[in-house]
Image (cartoon, rainbow, N blue to C red):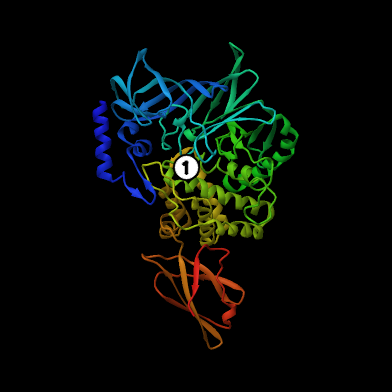
């Protein structure tokens, strides 16, 4: 496909699908479409392996190297799209000892092959590139490199790029739907520094001019935004976690700044109890062969697969602040980012619009950790503390095909949705079977929200489609209006949900004094009569369900 046809294709798609339109404060452009849409130039191939080899010039804040992409053709093609930010320069593209032509539009690169690549054919092509990758202004929320100095004045480098995209620093098919089966990454740095990346270190080689190359290998599927590098004068220590069933022996490796070495040895002891809880509640750690790492970074944290970025300054809570107000003494970054190994890394959404699956489940995992360590009452206190963080001004699910996540409510509201669903199911054995079942069914794949929603409904035996739609795709949560009137020695309770469309969801209320049972409100008024209760005895289990209520007197 020639450059003119490529441009025409995207222009027609944009006009026919209304992509370039204003949604609230966002105006989506062709650049957004090129970044977020699965066009035929992306679906025509599936990445099997990335082999990334780069040299980092710390002083110049400059990188150079190559990425060899091994892929299989999903359909016949002569042109495909890869992605690399405009500020990064492509030197050449090689294929079968020939140089390939390519063109660029925004951050998209269209590579033209000299012959037709047929469906089922496996090919390799190599992109050489260099440049100064964009610096992260406020990592990890904006994408790019963090070029910092430690307290001793030594270089301290990290990269984080979720939402912005891995193509801000290396050429790839930058869409969450396509994960390579494995990844190799070689990082060459000055010999007085250590380079840490995902997976296992396979080789350390002294190269010319006082440099050392660190070769890392990821043996599982990995999402592009999870690929990282960390460079510093690290001091390493390790441990081993053995799961209670003795089936898994997981290596724990910690890379910290030397002056934090003793502090880290004490602080990171909370990793093993956390793993005990997560193994019990969500199944085995997904990346046993690659191990578990915490790596100290100049930014707060990020869930880089098997190489979690840690920057919480060895404090409890969020840099010493207990955002929950619940008073529990654990490191938020360790607990939250480690949960992403299950939710976000092992199971990844194929469009960032569905990122609640990552963040809602990881936030809920914090509450499950609290329950595991401190008990159920503590769990209720922790999960309900999330209510103050919900704004309910935008839907949780974002806009598809334009690399647009939903609102930040995906964290607290996503967690509260799962808490509410647990209460609806009203069977913890079944609920936790569903959590582990999601891991067994979708581990090492990419999914969409609808698949997760369907699985939970089917396995619970409850149609939760209206619940998911309201909590994820509407701004506001359900509002239960009720009227309580005295009737003889008891009460007559009338209730319904305020809704613009059909909605039903069970909720627990006191049907006897101090005893809760289910009622089944819909958007239509219903009435329940209870005996031997006073008005003050009537309560709604608001600690179990995230809903608004209004007592109409």
Q: Callout 1: helix, strand or loop?
A: helix
Q: Quadrant of the N terminus?
A: top left
- Is 138 situated left or right of 128 in this image? right
- Is 492 situated left or right of 311 in this image? left
The image shows residue 537 at horizontal and vertical percentages of 59, 78
Residue at (44, 46) in percent of width and height:
405
Q: Which picture quadrant has residue 527?
A: bottom left
The image shows residue 235 at horizontal and vertical percentages of 69, 27
- Judging by the rendered image, the residue that carries numbered circle 1 is 442
For label 1, count other residues whose C-alpha is less than 10 Å away and answer few (under 14), some (14-19) or many (20+). Answer: some
Judge by depth and name the residue closer to the eye, 454 or 321. Answer: 321
The image shows residue 21 at horizontal and vertical percentages of 32, 47
- Is 212 situated left or right of 351 in this image? right
Judge by depth and name the residue closer to the eye, 462 or 158. Answer: 158
Q: In the current view of this chain or complex, which residue is farthest to the bottom? A: 488
The image shows residue 545 at horizontal and vertical percentages of 53, 63
Placement of 271 over or under 94, stated as above or below:
below
Residue at (56, 76) in percent of width and height:
538
Judge by depth and name the residue closer to the eye, 238 or 120. Answer: 238
Placement of 318 over or under 261, stated as above or below:
below
* Tally of marks: 1
Residue at (65, 60) in percent of width and height:
377
Q: In the current view of this chain or complex, which residue is farthest to the top? A: 208
Placement of 263 over or under 171, stated as above or below:
below
């Amino acid at each position: 496909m020639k450059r003119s046809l490529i441009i025409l294709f995207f222009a027609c798609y944009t006009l026919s699908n209304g992509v370039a339109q204003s949604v609230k404060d966002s105006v989506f452009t062709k650049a957004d479409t090129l970044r977020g849409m699965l066009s035929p130039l992306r679906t025509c191939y599936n990445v099997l392996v990335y082999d990334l080899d780069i040299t980092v010039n710390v002083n110049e804040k400059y990188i150079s190297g190559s990425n060899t992409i091994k892929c299989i053709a999903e359909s016949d093609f002569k042109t495909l799209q890869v992605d690399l930010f405009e500020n990064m320069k492509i030197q050449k593209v090689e294929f079968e000892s020939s140089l390939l032509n390519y063109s660029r539009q925004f951050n998209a690169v269209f590579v033209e092959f000299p012959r037709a690549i047929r469906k089922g054919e496996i090919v390799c092509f190599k992109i050489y590139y260099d440049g100064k990758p964009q610096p992260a202004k406020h990592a990890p929320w904006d994408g790019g490199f963090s070029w910092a100095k430690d307290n001793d004045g030594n270089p301290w480098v990290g990269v984080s790029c979720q939402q912005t995209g891995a193509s801000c620093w290396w050429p790839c098919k930058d869409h969450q739907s396509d994960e390579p089966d494995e990844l190799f990454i070689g990082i060459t740095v000055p010999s007085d520094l250590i380079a840490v990346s995902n997976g296992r270190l396979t080789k350390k080689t002294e190269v010319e001019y006082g440099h050392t190359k660190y070769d890392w290998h990821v043996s599982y599927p990995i999402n592009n935004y999870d690929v990282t590098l960390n460079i510093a004068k690290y001091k390493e220590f390790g441990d081993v976690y053995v799961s209670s069933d003795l089936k898994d022996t997981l290596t724990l490796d910690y890379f910290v700044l030397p002056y934090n070495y003793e502090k880290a040895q004490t602080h990171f002891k909370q990793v093993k109890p956390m793993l005990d809880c997560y193994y019990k509640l969500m199944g085995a750690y997904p990346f046993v062969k690659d191990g578990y790492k915490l790596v100290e970074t100049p930014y707060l944290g990020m869930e880089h697969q098997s190489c979690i970025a840690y920057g919480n300054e060895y404090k409890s809570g969020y840099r010493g602040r207990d955002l929950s107000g619940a008073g529990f003494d654990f490191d938020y970054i360790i607990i939250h980012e480690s949960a992403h190994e299950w939710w976000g890394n092992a199971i990844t959404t194929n469009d960032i619009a569905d990122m609640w699956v990552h963040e809602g489940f990881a936030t809920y995992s914090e509450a499950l950790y609290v329950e595991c360590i401190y008990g159920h009452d503590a769990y209720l206190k922790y999960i309900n503390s999330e209510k103050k963080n919900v704004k309910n001004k935008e839907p949780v699910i974002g806009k598809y095909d334009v690399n647009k996540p939903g609102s930040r409510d995906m964290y607290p509201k996503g967690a509260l949705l799962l808490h509410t669903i647990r209460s609806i199911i009203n069977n913890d054995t079944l609920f936790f079977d569903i959590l582990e079942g999601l891991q067994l069914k979708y581990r090492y794949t990419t999914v969409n929200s609808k698949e997760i929603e369907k699985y939970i409904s089917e396995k619970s035996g409850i149609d939760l489609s209206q619940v998911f739609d309201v909590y994820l795709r509407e701004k506001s949560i359900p509002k239960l209006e009720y009227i309580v009137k005295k009737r003889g020695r008891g009460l007559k309770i009338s209730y319904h949900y305020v809704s613009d469309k059909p909605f039903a969801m069970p909720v627990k209320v006191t049907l006897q004094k101090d005893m809760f049972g289910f009622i089944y409100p819909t958007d239509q008024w219903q009435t329940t009569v209870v005996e031997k209760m006073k008005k003050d005895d009537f309560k709604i289990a608001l600690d179990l369900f995230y809903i608004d209520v209004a007592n109409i007197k």
